[in-house]
Image: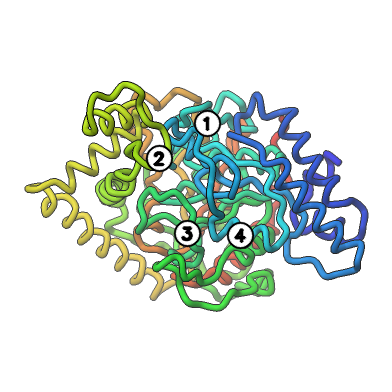
Amino acid sequence: MQELLKKSAMEQSKALKNKEVSAVELTKASLERIKSIDEKLGAFNSLTEDTALETAKKVDEKISKGEELPLLAGVPLALKDNMNLIGSKTTASSKILENFVSPYNATVTEKLLQNLVPIVGKANLDEFAMGSSNENSAFKKVHNPWNLNKVPGGSSGGSAASVAACEATLALGSDTGGSIRLPASFCGIVGMKPTYGKVSRYGLIAFASSLDQIGPFTRTVEDAAALLEVISGHDPHDSTSLKLPIENYRISLNNDIKGMKIGVVKELVKEGLAPDVEKAMQNAIDTYKSLGAEVVEISLPNIGHSIGIYYILATAECSSNLARFDGVKYGHRTDNANNLLDMYCKTRAEGFGPEVKRRIMLGTYALSSGYYDAYYKKAQQMRRIVTEDFLKAFEQVDALIAPTCPNTAFDLGSKTEDPLAMYLTDIATIGANLAGIPAMSIPAGFDCDGMPIGLQIMSPQLSEAKLFNIAYKFEQSHDYYKQLANI
């Protein structure tokens, strides 16, 4: 059973249909794997064993009756702990929501359950999805399965680590400035952020509403295409949800990419790259040339401003979104308040961690009277300019490639005292969120210490099918995705 857990979701799905294994057996194997190794990994905040086994039983009933299975039915999945699953704790890895039990399902959760995907647990994250290393969780740090002394990346570190360690075959994360792609890169798996509005955010605890997007973690590109197919689609509960038909992305995989133009973002490869990341990038360029694509250098002249733009806009939105956590209707409430204002202040002081407080204060400052025009308005104007850079680039090329991160996973604790150094980890990923375009990280090799390196691929809005195809062609040209963390 442990060997079956190392297989891809599509392979597991085939084994279920062929009655080589039951869904209950596969789900139990996943839960046993979590119980045996997660104490040292820290990928899960809680398990949802009863829900998972109940779903698995429904799959087995369908198989026994000879009924057709929905896509990915019976394949174990980890849900990032900022998405609602009814009856389970949804904490966002924060003390302020430590005992909050979801009263309803997120739309993505509902879609998973309709497709009979067993949700085995709620994955750890940086508190309220704010962080690049998954060291900001109020409960425990997540460790990288490739080296337990390294970070897994954030904020969706628990989701990524669970898939890389074969605790779950699939996972969902949320990506505000790289929170899916960075952990995917550090953990040697596939992580994908769809076009903004492609996946409903209803039931996702909001961080920065104009940037947040839910997406898949998998070990293969084909699995990511299948999982996005399951969770995407219009949702009337989310006003930013796009009214578009659900696509079958898998039929576009392995299409010929001869004659395609792929742009290398020169600003993201010219300086500051670790030598092994630079070599992996050159290997990617050579691979695409060998596949018949034309690879050219492309400039995104304002991409260097993306971190400054992001940390004004995201913190401003977080300041507004997190105002609801006041101890009145749900979540933690202080026991030591003298009056209403005192209750608000003490509740938030006790419930929020230092990184969340830092971002709330930055955002509140940027939105305050006298500073709004100088910071928030200017950042919105610059966001438009960065978006236009991407639009101009896509007039010349079909897709863009760059390293997902200038470096591989760093040591736990090495950047916690320097927030700016931590923020710079997202230099290559934030641009895609500002522009609302789809982007993904795929395994692209290993550094001299055996740590994974990620290749980021970006494409125009709503071109997910093309993006998956370009990623799949690279993936199938190498065996990086077949190598698993030894934990």
Q: Which mark is residue 110?
A: 4
Within 10 angstroms of label 1, few (less than 14), some, or many (20 or more) residues?
A: many
Answer few, some or many: residues within 10 Å of disc 3's Cα (few below 14, many 20 plus, some between 14 and 19): many
Callout 2 crowding tier (Cα within 10 Å): few <14, some 14–19, many ≥20: many
Q: Residue at x 46, y 37 (%)?
A: 274
The alpha-carbon separation of the residues under discs 3 and 4 comes to 11 Å
Q: Is 90 placed above or below 258 here?
A: above
Residue type of the residue flagged with mark 2: Met
* Foreground disc of the pair 1, 3: 3
Which residue does the numbered mark 3 point to in the structure image?
202
Residue 223 x, y percent position in the rendering: 68, 58
The label nearer to you, 4 versus 2, is 4
Q: Which residue is mark 2?
A: 130
- Mark 2 and mark 3 lie on one chain; the one further toward the N terminus is 2
Mark 1 element type? loop
Kindly check if marks 1 and 3 are in contact, taking CB atoms under 8 A apart as contact: no
Q: Amino acid at mark 4?
A: Glu
Which amino acid lies under the numbered mark 3 shown in the image of this protein?
Tyr
What is the spatial separation of the Cα atoms under label 2 and label 1, in whole angstroms? 15 Å
**Element under disc 3:** loop
